[in-house]
Amino acid sequence: MESILIHPDNAEQLKIVKAFLKDLKVKFESQVSTFPPHVLKGIEESIAQHENGQTISLQEFKEKHLVKK
């Protein structure tokens, strides 16, 4: 049998989907997805850099990291 993976955008959607599946008597598993600590730290650092104006354009990024010298 085929399985599906559902990604609700908020708690209300999750609640509705779970209720729907229960009403249909469809078996399902809940899994909490979290990012590893090093990923969360990187996200926080990037947000702080953006807030401090430490950004570059896409073109600058390409020139710095993608263009072969």
Image (cartoon, rainbow, N blue to C red):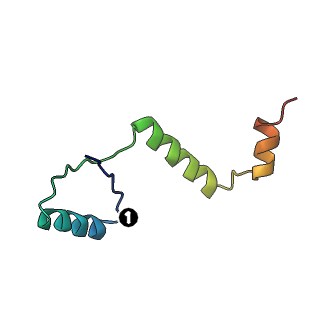
Instruction: Give how far across and how far down residue 6 sits, in percent.
Output: 33, 56
Q: Residue furthest right?
A: 69
Q: Is residue 38 left or right of residue 13?
A: right
Residue drawn 80% across the image and 47% down it: 60
Task: Determine whether 20 is above or below 6 in the image.
Answer: below
Instruction: Give how far across and how far down residue 17 sits, in percent.
Output: 24, 65
Question: Callout 1, which amino acid?
Answer: Asp
Q: Is residue 44 left or right of residue 17?
A: right
Task: Determine whether 67 is above or below 28 in the image.
Answer: above
Between 23 and 13, the one lying in front of the other is 23
Instruction: Give how far across and how far down residue 33 sits, in percent.
Output: 33, 46
User: Mark 1: which secondary structure?
Assistant: loop
Residue drawn 56% across the image and 52% down it: 47
Circle 1 sits on which residue? 9
Between 46 and 62, the one lying in front of the other is 62
Crowd rating for badge 1 (residues with CA inside 10 Å; few <14, some 14–19, many 20+)? few
Q: Is residue 69 left or right of residue 48?
A: right
Q: Is residue 28 left or right of residue 68?
A: left
Q: Residue furthest front?
A: 1
Q: How many marks?
A: 1
Image quadrant where residue 50 sits: bottom right
Between 2 and 50, the one lying in front of the other is 2
Image quadrant where residue 40 sits: top left
Residue drawn 77% across the image and 36% down it: 66
Task: Determine whether 63 is above or below 6 in the image.
Answer: above
Residue drawn 22% across the image and 67% down it: 15
Q: Quadrant of the C terminus?
A: top right
